[in-house]
Amino acid sequence: MLFTAPPDPVLEHPSDGRKMRVLYSEEQIAARVGELGRELRAELGPGEITLLCVLKGAFMFTADLARAMSGPLHVEFLGVRSYGDETTSSGAVQITHDLTAPIEGKHVVLVEDIVDTGLTVRYLLDTLRARGPASLRVCTLFERPSAGSPVRPEHVGFQLQGHEFIVGYGLDWAQRLRNLPYVAEIETR
């Protein structure tokens, strides 16, 4: 089930006065992440699942997703950089932190914050498939179908309709605003 954004008020971020509009509240995010956790467990069964968190943006989502899943679970982290301090992807993917355990023969869920152009996810899927997982699927909190990604995640929290730049709940702008408990569109001036 996909949710649409509520008509929340415009806020001003206290650190620099930029205008932000809340798109998804803390409560909406918690409810949807709970649903995604139950969907994944139902789909993959009672065996061990490896959640592969793509750092840094997906760390809050992965933590909440792990708590929403019953049964045996392993969490791994993969550091990736494709945005730098900009608001659009550079198109070049750099792995900054690799896995600490093998995924061969494991049921792996690649956990992303957002699938936009799909360049990062496509690169990661190709790289991870070469490591021989039993299954590999993508769970993303946000998807922007209008960006024309060649990758279609199997599990999507929310779909973004426009080209808004979003922050909060792990998503950043120049390494800032990850700590917001909600997700907001921010003016980038």
Image: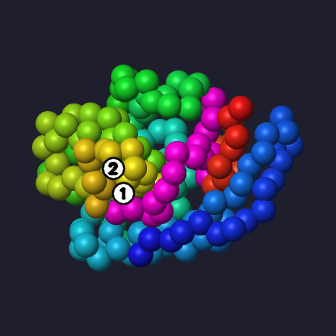
Q: Position of residue 147 (x, y in %)?
A: 39, 44
Q: Main secondary structure of the magenta part?
A: loop
Residue 50 visible in the snapshot = no
At numbered mark 1, what does the secondary structure look like: helix, strand or loop? strand
**Which stretch did the figure color magenta?**
155-175
Which amino acid type is shown beneath numbered disc 2?
Leu
Q: Position of residue 67 (x, y in %)?
A: 50, 66
Mark pair 2, 1: CA separation: 6 Å
**Which scheme is used to colour this image of the protein?**
rainbow
Vertical order, 82 against 185 (above or below): above
On screen, residue 180 versus residue 130, left or right, reads right
Q: Residues within 10 Å of mark 2 (few under 14, many from 20)?
A: many
Q: Quadrant of residue 187?
A: top right
Residue 184 visible in the snapshot = yes
Which amino acid type is shown beneath numbered disc 1?
Cys
Residue at the image point whose x is 31% and y is 44% from the top: 149
- Specify whether residue 167 is painted magenta: yes
Vertical order, 30 against 20 (above or below): below
Q: Quadrant of residue 174?
A: top right
At numbered mark 2, what does the secondary structure look like: helix, strand or loop? strand
Residue at the image point whose x is 57% and y is 46% from the top: 164
Q: Nearer the viewer, residue 179 or 1?
A: 1
The first of marks 2 and 1 along the sequence is 2
Q: Nearer the viewer, residue 161 or 129?
A: 161
- The residue that mark 1 highlights is 139
Q: Which mark is residue 110?
A: 2
Q: Position of residue 126 (x, y in %)?
A: 19, 37
Q: CB atoms at circles 2 and 1 under 8 Å apart?
A: yes
Q: Position of residue 5 (x, y in %)?
A: 59, 66
Q: Residues within 10 Å of mark 1 (few under 14, many from 20)?
A: many
